[in-house]
Image (cartoon, helix red, strand yellow):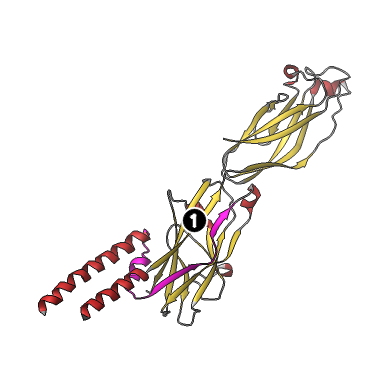
Amino acid sequence: MKTTFLFLSLLGAASSFGQQSVTGFIESPAMSAVNLIASNERPLDFSSIDAYAQGQLIQNYCQLEVKSNHPWILSAVLNDYSGVTNQQAEQNLIKIRVQGTQDFVSLVPGVAVPIYVSNNQLLRNTYTLDVWVDPKLNMGSHQIKQMQLSFQLASN
Amino acid sequence: MHHTMKHFLFPLVGLFAFSSSQGQIALNSGSISPGIAALSNTNSISVTQHQPLVFSYQSIDEYDMDKTITNALSVELAPRQANQFIYCQVVFNGPPQPQLAQRLGLKLRNPVQVPYSGDFDHIVMLSTTPVKIAEVSKQSPGSLHYDVLLRKQTKMESTGNFNYTLVFSIIQP
C-alpha cells in the first residue's frame, strides 16, 4: 500500500515541474507603400532654341520613400493631361533615373514602366529621382503640355 | 511480501525513463539544456496567460513601431529558491523563424534581478533557443508579470501567419 502511494506522487511531480508554455499568433501580411516625401516641381520653359535643342535635366526632381516587407518593383506612370496624347511621339519626351543608377528610362504615357527593383533587405528605403525632358523630337512649337508622374509598387 | 515490492518497482523505473525523454524533446536547445537540468530538481513553474498573445499588422507603417501586449502573462515558481533561473524559448509551428523570434521580447512588470546588466527597463529579447529571462531568489515576488513585445521590423522577413509557442523552463544550477 505504501509503495502504491509513492508511485502516484511521482506521477504528479513529473507532469508539473520543468516547463510550461503558452501559445500565440502573429499575422504578418505582405504590404508595401510608396510616398512622395519631397518634390521639385516647376514649369519648364523651352522658349529659347538652345533649351529646346538640349532639353532640360531636373536633378532631385523628387524624393520617394518606399516601404515594403517583401521584394518589389517600382514603376513610373506618365499621364498626359494636355488633351492630345501621341504615345509613340511622346515616349522619349520624359526620361527618369533613380540617382545612383546609370541610365535614364524612357516613360510612355499611360504605361507603368519599371524604373527600379529592390536590391536590399531594408524595410524602408529613400530614393531621389532625376528627370530629363527632351522636347526636340517630341513636341511641336507653341505646345503646352501638362503632365503628371505617378509611382506604383508591385511584388517582385 | 518480498515478491510484492518487486512488482511495484518496475513501473517506477518506467516512469523515470518517460520523464527524461519528455524534457529532451521539448527543449531542442544547443549547449543549454535547462529542461533536462530541471528534471533533477523538484521545482515547478506555472505560466498563466492573461491576454491573447496575438500580433497583427494593418498597414506597412505599423512595422515601424513596437507592439506591446500589456500584462500578457505571469510566471510562478514553487517553491522559490535561491538562484533559480527562468528560461524562455520561442518555437514556431512549421519552419523556424529566427528573425521573427528575435523581435519577440518579454518586459518584466515587477522588479526582480535580471540576468544581464544593461538590459533596458527589464526587457529581454527572445530567440528560437532558450534565453535566460530572470534570476529569482527567495525574496522575489511570487508571480513575475510580463508584457510581451514585438519589436519593429527593419528588414524584410517571411510574410504570412505564424503560430508560436513560448516555452518557459526553470533551472537551479
Say if residue B138 shows up in the picture: yes
Q: Quadrant of the C terminus of chain A?
A: top right
At x 48%, y 78%, the residue is: B142
Badge 1, how many Cα within 10 Å: few under 14, some, many 20+? many
Query: Which residues make up the magenta segment?
Result: B28-56
**Residue type beneath disc 1:** Ala
Q: Is residue A93 above or below residue B80?
A: above
- Looking at this rendering, what residue extends furthest in the bottom direction? B139
> Residue A139, how many percent across, how many down?
81, 19
Q: Residue A155's x, y, as percent?
A: 58, 36
Provide the secondary structure element on which disc 1 rests: helix
Task: Tell me the residue that label 1 is attached to.
Answer: B101
- x%, y% of residue A63? 73, 40
Label 1 resides on the chain identified as B
Whether B34 is among the magenta residues is yes
Decide if residue B50 is on the left or right side of residue A113: left
Quarter of the image that includes the N terminus of chain A: bottom left
Q: Is residue A39 above or below residue A56?
A: below
